Image: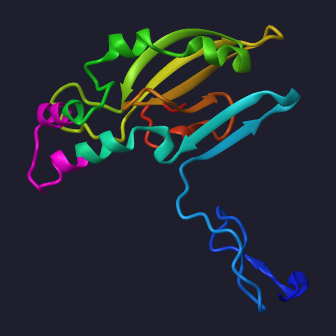
Amino acid sequence: MPSRAHCTPTSSSEWSPPILTTGDCEPGPVTPKQFLSAGFYFGAKGRLLQFQASGPATGDASSKAAYAKLTGSGKSYSGAELIAAFKKGGGKYGPDDKEAFVKNLPIAKLEPYLGKLKVISVEFAPFSEADRSDFNDQMDWEVKAVVTRHDGTSATYRIRFEQYKGNLVAFGDTSTYPWNLLDINSKDQP
């Protein structure tokens, strides 16, 4: 068996584990599919200021596939038809499900990490209530909350949840950069 001393680890991308490809080495570990990517940003005193997650594990892959199948014909759909397809495909928290979404918010689970949360608004964003034709399965629920930290200081946070299962996908202290990366299309950025 060849010595690995002369093998050079390389990677197919910055998100992959190293793959040994040079010298007379055998290939190292290969990850065929990444299910979750997450980022955490900490500020002064070790405060958790930002979090963002993406990937198939943040939602419901079978519901997303069902929605894509129901709406993938190339036909033009009304907003009502798109929302009906989302629900038929297994989506849980569409724009008409605010009451159920609010009832199931995991606020108590976030408080040990952020501090006491007081919800100030809950919106399905970005969404035009007028004709609903802008509905798509990539929209999120956005919760704005005032956080009173354990040291008595406070901040406003934007907290985002995906609409299929209501899973947390991002949050951020709005006074810190890069809070606006949570939603680069937000219409209410300062």
| Residue 137, horizontal then vertical, whole percent | 31, 40
Q: Quadrant of residue 170?
A: top right
- Judge left or right: residue 12 versus residue 136: right
Color encoding of the figure = rainbow
**Residue 86, above or below 102:** below
- Magenta stretch mostly in which secondary structure? helix
Q: Quadrant of the N terminus?
A: bottom right
Q: Residue at x 24, y 43 (%)?
A: 67
- Judge left or right: residue 61 versus residue 13: left
Q: Residue at x 54, y 26 (%)?
A: 159
| Residue 128, horizontal then vertical, whole percent | 25, 30
Q: Residue at x 67, y 34 (%)?
A: 50
| Residue 23, horizontal then vertical, whole percent | 78, 91
| 77 within the magenta span | yes
123 or 51: nearer the viewer: 51
| 173 within the magenta span | no
Which residues make up the magenta segment?
A: 68-85
**Residue 152, above or below 74:** above
**Residue 136, above or below 88:** below
**Residue 168, above or below 100:** below
Q: Residue at x 71, y 73 (%)?
A: 28
49 or 74: nearer the viewer: 74
Q: How many marks?
A: 0
Q: Quadrant of the C terminus?
A: top right
53 or 69: nearer the viewer: 69
Q: Quadrant of residue 21?
A: bottom right
Extreme residue in the front direction: 1
Q: Quadrant of residue 27?
A: bottom right
